[in-house]
């Protein structure tokens, strides 16, 4: 350890300890950009992407779930050396097509988005008729064991194995009852083979190690939202009118939420295909104003000065 004594004056001396030597800074390596920005957990990403060499270019697929301020995004992605490729994606902004136009970021909406992503992917790869998923939503974990391998689907076809994807949560905290697991459950019920357990689903008690599937089912169908709607309507009707204004505009009540989500699930299974892209035509009528030259700017300022001087002279004359 090295110490540095710095004399500020004859009677006062300060003590400064050198924490990091020159050798530390010479060997310092800057972390990856997305690590510095706090966007990518590379320890997690390595384990999600690295594939055994004897698998010959067969990638590991990931179910990527992300939440923004307004929507839920689910993607099926795989990585190549020059970046990721997206096989298919679904967003909760598409749910108004299926009859759900409010609450596009809650647990029930995350389930619907995961279901839509799963059905869309299986339709794309031709497995939608082989693996239809779980029609009766009960909150339980479905799995089938063949030999030493566990598949998280109802039945495994002899000719075609289920499409396996691994959950990619990013940097979000995976607490019990997190909305990410709503999207996971939706994708699993949609027919994807995603390894998971009930330990992070709503209704699991870590102390007693018991799982209440009915509580999870209630969350999938927006029961928690309905309970809060009823509570707020009784306790503070003004706050209820403000907070659930979008629900009231669509005539959605707490009692009708389960039927609403059931109809949304049915419509997603009927047609999970993406909507047609609308042709974009830019507005060419707008024209940017030309930049003024230095002479024009000076003349403009002088004109304002002259106008102000004339106004002051008129006031003095009066």
Image: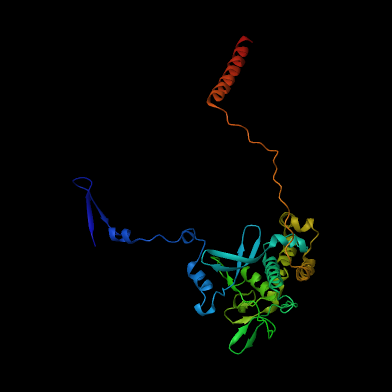
Task: Tell me the quarter of the image containing the N terminus.
Answer: bottom left
How many marks are shown on the rendered structure?
A: 0
Residue 21 visible in the displayed image: no
Q: Nearer the viewer, residue 58 or 25?
A: 58
Q: Nearer the viewer, residue 119 or 203?
A: 119
Task: Tell me the quarter of the image containing the C terminus.
Answer: top right
Q: Residue 268: horizontal and vertical position, in percent?
A: 75, 68
- The image quarter containing residue 87 is bottom right
**Residue drawn at point x = 73 percent, y = 52 percent:** 279
Horizontal arrangement in the rendering, residue 144 relative to residue 84 (left or right): right
- The image quarter containing residue 128 is bottom right
Q: Residue 49: horizontal and vertical position, in percent?
A: 53, 71
> Is 304 rendered above or below residue 88?
above
Horizontal arrangement in the rendering, residue 169 relative to residue 228 (left or right): left
**Residue drawn at point x = 66 percent, y = 60 percent:** 71
Q: Nearer the viewer, residue 18 or 275?
A: 275
């Amino acid at each position: 350890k090295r110490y540095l004594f710095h004399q500020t004056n004859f009677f006062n001396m300060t003590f400064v300890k050198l924490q990091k030597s020159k050798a530390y800074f010479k060997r310092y390596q800057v972390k990856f950009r997305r690590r510095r920005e706090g966007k990518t957990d590379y320890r997690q990403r390595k384990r999600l992407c690295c594939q055994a060499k004897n698998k010959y270019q067969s990638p590991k697929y990931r179910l990527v779930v992300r939440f923004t301020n307004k929507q839920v995004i689910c993607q099926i992605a795989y990585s190549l050396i020059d970046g990721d490729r997206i096989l298919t994606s679904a967003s909760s902004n598409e749910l108004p097509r299926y009859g759900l136009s409010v609450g596009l970021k809650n647990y029930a909406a995350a389930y619907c988005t995961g279901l839509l992503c799963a059905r869309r992917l299986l339709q794309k790869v031709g497995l939608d008729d082989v693996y239809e998923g779980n029609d009766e939503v009960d909150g339980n974990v479905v799995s089938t064991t063949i030999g030493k391998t566990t598949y998280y689907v109802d039945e495994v076809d002899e000719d075609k194995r289920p499409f396996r994807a691994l959950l990619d949560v990013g940097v979000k905290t995976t607490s019990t009852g997190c909305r990410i697991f709503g999207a996971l459950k939706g994708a699993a019920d949609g027919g994807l083979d995603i390894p998971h357990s009930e330990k992070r689903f709503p209704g699991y008690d870590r102390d007693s190690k018991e799982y209440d599937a009915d509580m999870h089912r209630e969350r999938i169908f927006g029961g928690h939202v309905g309970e809060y709607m009823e509570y707020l309507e009784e306790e503070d009707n003004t706050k209820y009118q403000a907070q659930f204004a979008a629900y009231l505009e669509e005539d959605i009540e707490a009692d009708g939420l389960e039927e609403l989500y059931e109809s949304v699930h049915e419509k997603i299974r009927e047609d999970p295909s993406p909507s047609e892209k609308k042709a974009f035509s830019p507005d060419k009528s707008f024209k940017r104003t030309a930049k003024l030259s230095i002479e024009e700017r000076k003349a403009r300022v002088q004109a304002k000065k002259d106008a102000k001087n004339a106004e002051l002279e008129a006031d003095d004359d009066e």
